[in-house]
Amino acid sequence: MPMLRRLDSSRVVPSARRAFATPAVNPGAAGGRSLGIRLVLPLFFSLVLAACGAKDPPYVERPVEELYNTAMDAVAVSEWEAAARGFDEVERQHPYSVWATKAQLMAAYAHYQKNSYTDAISAAERFIQLHPGSKETPYAYYLVGICYYEQITDVGRDQKITQQALNALEEVVRRYPNSEYARDARLKIDLTRDHLAGKEMTIGRYYLRSGQQIAAINRFRAVIEKYQTTTHVPEALHRLAEAYMSLGVLDEAQNVAAVLGYNYPGSEWYVDTYTLVTGEAVPGTKSANGESKGWFGRTWNSIF
């Protein structure tokens, strides 16, 4: 019990011992021992009762408007911890009130603002489960996605959170394609996919440097096939051609180079890949009048 831990044992315990050891009457008399016990026991039990009585203040129900407005006042001054507790209290005291529904979502928002992403996601997902048809549900889905999105780390780390962010943001777009949240979600989806492609490229480069060309090819192909709209595709094509050249598979390297030249004729990866595959500098291209663009254009036409 808290108060007993704060007692000074150097005073309480020895004094009790002295009362037993040095009674005011003859040490051999039973009455003296009885008197000592009667003196000490009331003091002991009073301390125990006082410690047990140190409890939280009694529960007092407050009007829902007062609780909600107090929590909103905390939001206004960015006291997010107090706000989250206040909104939770609204639901605890008035679970069937219309304000409890609002408080559930506001609690998720307060947790998000204080960077308690796990609590925010939990609160938002709970709101979704309890109120799937609410007009505020799109925001709850969006909040889940944002909580994951803001936890994305650099490509050198595990990208589980990045995938979770992508899944959550795509859910917003799928369910509410015309909402204001979908517009922002689409932008963040592009950035998230670019981040995932960057992770694949990091692993692929490592495999390529380590002489594990097959593993590297699988990573670069994943970028090309799964993340076609990202900024990493030109380099992925170049690295893929490089891996095929290392294996001595010239035809595959030429095919990849043709795709790169057709889709990204002006990129630096086009220049490097052309030199890698042909051993020559890139020749001048013809005007854009539907004719083939150099060697790459001719190879593209012969393949496709």
Image (cartoon, grey):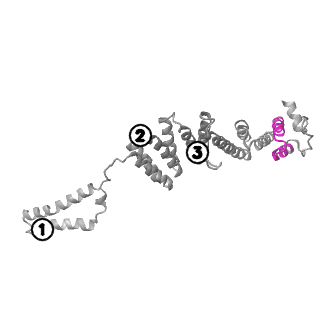
The secondary structure type at the circle numbered 1 is loop
The secondary structure type at the circle numbered 2 is loop
Labelled pair 3, 1 in contact (Cβ < 8 Å): no
Locate the C terminus by quadrant. Answer: top right
Residue 146, numbered label: 3
Which is closer to the viewer, label 3 or label 1? 3
How far apart in space, not on screen, are marks 3 and 1 (Cα)? 73 Å
The type of residue carrying mark 2 is: Ser
How far apart in space, not on screen, are marks 2 and 1 (Cα)? 65 Å
The secondary structure type at the circle numbered 3 is helix
Crowd class of label 2 (few under 14; some 14 to 19; many from 20; radius 10 Å): few
Counting from the top left corner in percent of width and height, residue 132 is at 51, 34
> Is 87 in front, or is 53?
87
The type of residue carrying mark 3 is: Ile
Q: Which residue is mark 1?
A: 23
> Is 120 in front, or is 35?
120
Locate the N terminus by quadrant. Answer: bottom left
**Magenta span includes 257:** yes
Counting from the top left corner in percent of width and height, residue 302 is at 87, 31
Mark 3 or mark 1: whose residue is earlier in sequence: 1
Left or right for 166, reference 255: left
Counting from the top left corner in percent of width and height, residue 207 is at 71, 44
Residue 97, numbered label: 2
First to last magenta residue range: 248-274
Q: What residue is drawn where x is 52% and y is 47%?
A: 109
Mark 2 or mark 1: whose residue is earlier in sequence: 1
Left or right for 172, reference 253: left
Mark 3 or mark 2: whose residue is earlier in sequence: 2
